[in-house]
Image (tube, helix red, strand yellow):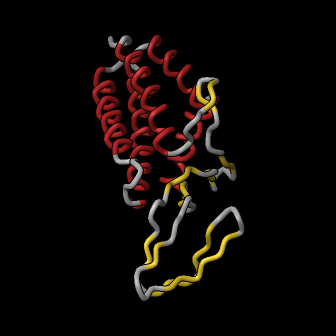
Amino acid sequence: MNPLAIQKATKKLEKMKKAAGLIVDGAPVSVIIDAWETFLSASGTFYSALEQGSKASKKSKHWFDLEKHKRRTDPLLKYLHHARNAEEHGLRGITKITNSNVLLKPGASAEVSSDGKQLYVRAIEGEVEFPGDRIAIIRVHNDKFNNHCDPPDTHLEKNIDDRSPKGVATLAIIYFEKMLEAAQKLLD
């Protein structure tokens, strides 16, 4: 394993941790979405660095080939890969806003309806806030290959209890820390 790959992957893991730290209840929706996108981008570069570094020896190349297989087969790792590609190369969104409440300031008005599953706001006049908004991960699409990937419900054959961006990022960071430790053991 090339030591430069370890350095770069370590920086990207720190970037992922910093981004995940911004994904908290009560944070503005725009901050959470930006942090999730940053997390996904850094996760892609994390893999790329280790892939390039693994070319230094047959042993590290074999190790990374096994990691690539996990990325193709584990629902959480696969989702991160597809979501990152959808964000960086696609036009469709990778998240949606859920759990909206509507707070009307004095003199404000809004036309709101619901189908029992989703809240629809058709018109807003004056100062209207949406406190308590949450971000959910959604099915992501790769228009280039005309395929999609649903949010993960398992990781390493265990059910995922928290499928929010924060929950998924937390599980991914734990996995990436172990992956980086394994890569460090392959240093030439």
Between 104 and 173, the one nearer to me in the picture: 104
Image position of 122 with respect to 91: above or below: below
Q: Quadrant of residue 20?
A: top left
Image position of 39 with respect to 185: above or below: below
Between 129 and 39, the one nearer to me in the picture: 129
Residue positioned 28% across, 27% down in the render = 7
**Quadrant placement of the N terminus:** top left
**Residue 11 shows in the view:** yes
Residue positioned 51% across, 15% down in the render = 62
Image position of 57 with respect to 118: above or below: above
Which residue lies most toward the right here? 115
Query: Where residue 167 sits in the image (x, y, percent)?
Result: 49, 38
Query: Where residue 147 sits in the image (x, y, percent)?
Result: 69, 49
Question: How many numbered badges does the structure rendering display?
Answer: 0
**Quadrant placement of the C terminus:** top left
Name the side, left or right, on which 185 lies relative to 82. left
Residue positioned 55% across, 84% down in the render = 123
**Residue 54 shows in the view:** no
Residue positioned 57% across, 30% down in the render = 71
Q: Quadrant of residue 128?
A: bottom left
